[in-house]
Amino acid sequence: MLVKIQTNWFVPVAVPFPVPHKVEGCYVMSKCLLSTHPPTPFEVDNDKSRRRRRRRRRRRSNWSCGCGSEEAHAQRQDLSESESESKRELEVLEARRAISSYLGELGVSEEESLSIAWNCPGYVKMLVEGVRDLDEWGWEADEEIAGLSFKDKILHVAAQKGDKGKIAYLETLGLTLSWSINVAGYLSAHTLPSLMHKVTRIKQLFFSPSDNDNNNHPSLLMRNIRLTMRHLSISIDEDLQRTFSFFEKLQAKPGGLNILASQDSAFSSLIQSFPRMLHLSVDNHLTLILDSLLNFGIPTSRVSHIILAFPPLLFWNHQILQTRLLAVKQINVADQDYAKLLLKYPWLLSTSIQENYVELLAFSYSIKVPKTQIDRAIESHPHLLSCSTSKLELMVDQFAKLGVRKKKLSQVIAKSPQLLLRKPKDFLQIVLLFENMDLDKETIGRILARCPEIFASSINKTLQRKIEFLDRVGVRKTFWPGVIRKYPELLVSDIDKTLLLRIMYLMKLGLSEEEIAFMVRTFSPLLGYSIEGVLKPKIEFLVNSMERPVRDVVSYPRYFSYSLEKKIKPRYWVLKRRDIKCSLKDMLGKNDEEFAAEFMGIGRMPVSHPESSNDSL
């Protein structure tokens, strides 16, 4: 018969029992435990005390009111339930004492045995129910056992399980009772003290205490796992199959992959999926694995992320790991920071990923893209390594339909390698957006080559918002194709931090909304210029030195595209010396020969070497 065990095991009893002292470093895995030390037998749950007081008051009230037999029956039932509850609590208490004693006999220290006994509720429940079942069905097989105390019966049932305390210990690590029983079956060759020692050593080796202090690391790990699972399109080896099976099991649990953010939860999940790791020799195997990762440049605090991302490497021969690490260096990485690449993409150590890299190189050769470009793309977006060449070819074909090939293709891959990870249907949605603006395929191809980031953006979250911004600043729909054709970067610029600030600056100069809208639709690159680096110094020179009104730039906003030091100032001083007045367009819109012929009477204007300037426009 299964009896629900209440969360509070203790009621005041008049029997002496030593109060267990606080156990440092105890893993609290049970919802029933509210502290890191076992509760004393005199700690009483407040909620239950209140319920009992209410029952007493109700009984006194019922007697004083002369209640009938139904009330009396309810009172007797309450008393019976209270007595049963107290009995269960005493049994759980006695069971914990028995488990602590049993673990001590197995060679576990008093402190550790107390910690385990008070942190394995499932194991306690299993033993208590085992004794109850035997009490119910009788101990006919052995009358001597039938006469034992409850504590001795607990000890007898625990011994009969044959796990020698390992189930209780595994539960304290965070495994459920069923998984603790399952994993304990792999560990029959271990004594409990040796198992506890090995677990401590493994944690010290691979799970640095500083891990939990680096909150960004777990989130980066989980993000990379999700991206890899999303883009995986190649045949995978057994190691990767086991790894992704591990991730899928985590996703099915409450909390999902976020379990990996907790050191203890991640470790228990690792043992649950890879129990054979507890058979590995710490000194002759695991320390060699650790040394190889450290020598490769992986920081001690990040080793656990490599292990959690790719647990099968723990089972590799040391020489195999060294060979796989050496293969990683075939990829050209900036500053030779291969550790950074491996942290971002630990699956690069698998045979299937390393073989796919060779396939990617052959593919890049076929489309005339240099190895350096592919390596650079992999460095920034290593999830390309989990994509099949057939999938990448689908995207390259879409680029070719827009006229983006060879050199232009290399530029696109170098600027936005994430485009190769897109689905063709998502890419074509953006192409359709431009076609609906009456842009032809040739123009769309030029936009792709110039600003490929646009095609990696979200239509709803990014592109549509920028188009709506144009409408808000007074640029009508008929002018959108021209604006985007001249300055496609507008579609990936930040509205609040870039575009809006430049509009506000022009308004502060005294220009009206209509004038600014005219400037944007006639010269949209205006919105890409830095205020402090370009707009402000050129306005100041226009007003202070040239003594022209600000509104002169409305009719010729291209004024801001010319270099202040190399073109605006030299031409202004030439006109000033000759006392010639002309519009900004006539002053700057002509090439050097045309300017010299019209304003100087010679074939070419001599221009002195400009002073150094940070103005690149």
Image (cartoon, rainbow, N blue to C red):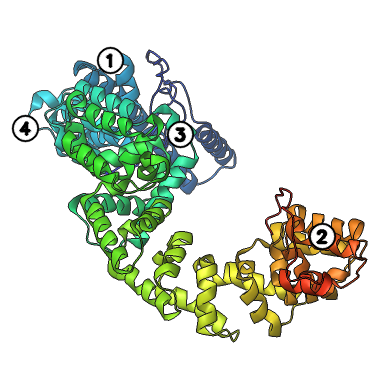
Q: State the residue in front, 494 or 307.
A: 494
Assign the N terminus to one quadrant of the image. top left
Residue 508 in percent (x, y) is at 87, 61
Left or right? Give the position of 11 relative to 296: right
**Mark 1 and mark 4 residues within 8 Å of each other at the beta carbon:** no
Residue at image point 37% right, 14% down: 17
Q: Amino acid at mark 1?
A: Ser
Q: Amino acid at mark 4?
A: Ala
Left or right? Give the position of 156 relative to 15: left
Q: CA distance from mark 3 to mark 2?
A: 46 Å
Q: Amino acid at mark 3?
A: Asn
Residue 321 in percent (x, y) is at 21, 38
Closer to the N terminus: mark 3 or mark 2? 3
Q: CA distance from mark 1 to mark 2?
A: 74 Å
The mark found on residue 141 in the picture is 4
Closer to the N terminus: mark 1 or mark 2? 1
Marks 1 and 4: which is nearer the front? 1
Marks 4 and 2: which is nearer the front? 2
Q: Amino acid at mark 2?
A: Tyr
Element marked by disc 4: loop
> Is 511 located above or below residue 89 in the figure?
below
Q: State the residue in front, 74 or 363.
A: 363
Residue 454 in percent (x, y) is at 54, 68
Residue at image point 54% right, 45% down: 67
Left or right? Give the position of 69 relative to 169: right
Residue at image point 37% right, 55% down: 372
The mark found on residue 505 in the picture is 2
Element marked by disc 2: helix
Q: CA distance from mark 1 to mark 3?
A: 28 Å
